[in-house]
Image: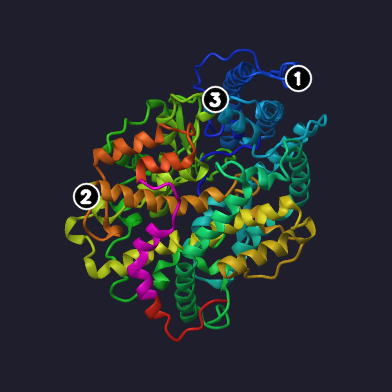
Amino acid sequence: MKKFAVSVSFAALALASCATTPQNREVGPLPSAQNEEIQAPASAQPTVADARKFVADAEADLLALSNISQQAQWVNSTYITDDTDALAAYFGTIGTEKGVKYASEAAKYANIPGLDFDTARKLNILRGALVLAAPTTPGAAAELNDIATKLNSTYGKGRASLHGKVLTGDDVEAAMGTNRNPAELAEMWKTWHENVGRPMKADYARMVQIANAGAKELGYPDTGAMWRSQYDMTPEQFSAMYDRLWSEVEPLYKDLHCYTRTKLNQKYGNAVQPANGPIRADLLGNMWAQEWGNIYDIVAPKGSGDLGFDTGELLAKKGYDPVKMVKAGEGFYTSLGLAPLPESFWQRSQITRPRDREVICHASAWDVDNKNDLRIKMCTKVNSDDFVTIHHELGHNYYQRAYNQQPYLYLNGANDGFHEAIGDFIALSITPQYLVQIGLLDANKVPSADKDTGLLLRQAMDKVAFLPFGLMVDKWRWGVFDGSITPATYESAWVDLKKQYQGITPPVARSEADFDPGAKYHIPGNTPYARYFLARLLQFQFYKAACDMSGWKGPLHRCSFYGNKEVGARLNQMLAMGASKPWPDALQVFTGSREISGKPMLEYFAPLQAWLKKQNEGKQCGW
């Protein structure tokens, strides 16, 4: 999966901002971790006016720190050295200390009678905005940020190997998608997980201890409960919604799993992939078995499975390079009536991997000054996956710009699932018709209706296959934070959850010396993951709403709303709200509904699910 923000400290408070200032911006004196913080009044009974002043002062202070802090993180992500690690950790420590201080002070104002809506909402945001909260113990914030920076850089420097040849993270991801040799797949999987994950385990366990102590000081049972409290509902209500949504879509996933396992068994035989039970993780075309689209060639049904084109091949044939791919992504948004990206975007983004330094290639979208300094960071390759990723990342940038007139603490999506879903629902519109509209595909090569099974199966191999992975990453982390998963069971719990929800098993034996969670970026990067599960469902709600708005009458999966200005206007109306209202309000503005639902996804894939059930007749599905 792709992320839009990474930080354990200040950027978490900065919420949607994960970027830097313009290079020519005047920067005042550097903030210090020892600077005097904004204090609650000494009075035992603070007033509404006191609360409003506290919020206003906190917003101004955090905004002032945001730019230089995000500059340090940008440089650290795009030029990894011991020095940039130190800079990122330094500003992260300041941000964490400020965040903990403001969270603690905000709690003192939260129960004042007569608070207006905005003051109460901003106090709640301040109290729970940190991803990882350090306790007030001297040195705790510095230790927390040192560990988090180290974990992030360890991932960025990670390597796998194949026949003795060293592979970077982006290269091994690409190789896992195309290689069909089980022994070589197992070697790449094993070396990546062991080189990247294993060294992190002790540091990760220590980080959890510190963060939990910080969460408890803020009044939360643990860090996981703090994360779940940020959705305009209680942690318990969020967990119930999470499980409800999974129950809606689980049958569709199990149908896809059963069919895919059969095809893998037919290709590799019982010795590699048995006909029953879980699927071997490295055979699914992705390092984490989270999306399976790269093995579409293995599962494609005869006839309807041959779509007649491959987006990556079309891009190469038309002479697209990475920059031209990003230009095409921008073109979708401007076709809806949204403004082009600023010139600084093209000057400051990392669109391809630099040849002369260590960088974090994991795709992300950044915002600097909370106004218009937007960037993406990718190591783009000319293929269909990165074409989709570009549309996704730009969704974050357009969201960031749409809400840039909001007060500082509202500079975020309605919830974090919204931020991920915007670009994803735009990317759902990368249909054959859209490819025709932008000149990539000849009109006479648009797949006919008898190819719908293939079109839907190709989408499901990514969209549906991801669902249980999106669910279980934070299921594991919540267990780590609440203590039900201990360092002694980190690995076995991860393996067990992948089997329980995904029906996936590792290709080689694992032990508690391993730390496979660390081989997935969002674990060492401390990016909460429930957002991606929510986004996978929200994107279909947004997509269906956009297609209905545009008057689309055909099958839902064929809809492209490219060029529809009404969709663009309604979309921008929702995006401009930022985090200023509870997320059901924002959802209602664009979709008319106040509840997240799996039903639009089920409607989209209904023809495929009926077909899968026929293919699976007589098979022993499940694991």
Q: Closer to the camera, 621 or 188?
A: 621
Image side of residue 201 versus residue 234, left or right: right
Rounded to the nearest whole Å, what is the CA distance between mark 1 and mark 2?
Answer: 59 Å
Of mark 1 and mark 2, the one earlier in the sequence is 1
Vertical position of residue 236 compared to residue 35: above or below = below
- Mark 3: give few (<14), some (14-19) or many (20+) Cα within 10 Å: few
Q: Secondary structure at mark 3?
A: loop
Residue 235 colored in magenta in the image: no
From the image, give the main secondary structure of the stretch colored magenta: helix
Residue 596 colored in magenta in the image: yes
Q: Closer to the camera, 229 or 355?
A: 229
Instruction: Tell whether label 1 touches label 3 (CB within 8 Å).
Output: no
Q: Residue 44's mark? A: 1
Q: Which amino acid type is shown beneath numbered disc 1?
A: Ala
| In the image, farthest residue toward the bottom | 618
Numbered disc in front, either 1 or 2: 1
Q: Closer to the camera, 311 or 207?
A: 207
- Mark 1: give few (<14), some (14-19) or many (20+) Cα within 10 Å: few
Residue 558 placement: quadrant: bottom left
Q: Residue 116's mark? A: 3
Q: Position of residue 472 (x, y in %)?
A: 60, 59
Of mark 3 and mark 1, the one earlier in the sequence is 1
Q: Which residues are magenta?
A: 592-612
Kindly tell me whether residue 267 is visible in this rendering.
yes
Q: Secondary structure at mark 2?
A: loop
Image side of residue 276 versus residue 454, left or right: right
Q: Which amino acid type is shown beneath numbered disc 2?
A: Gly
Numbered disc in front, either 3 or 2: 3
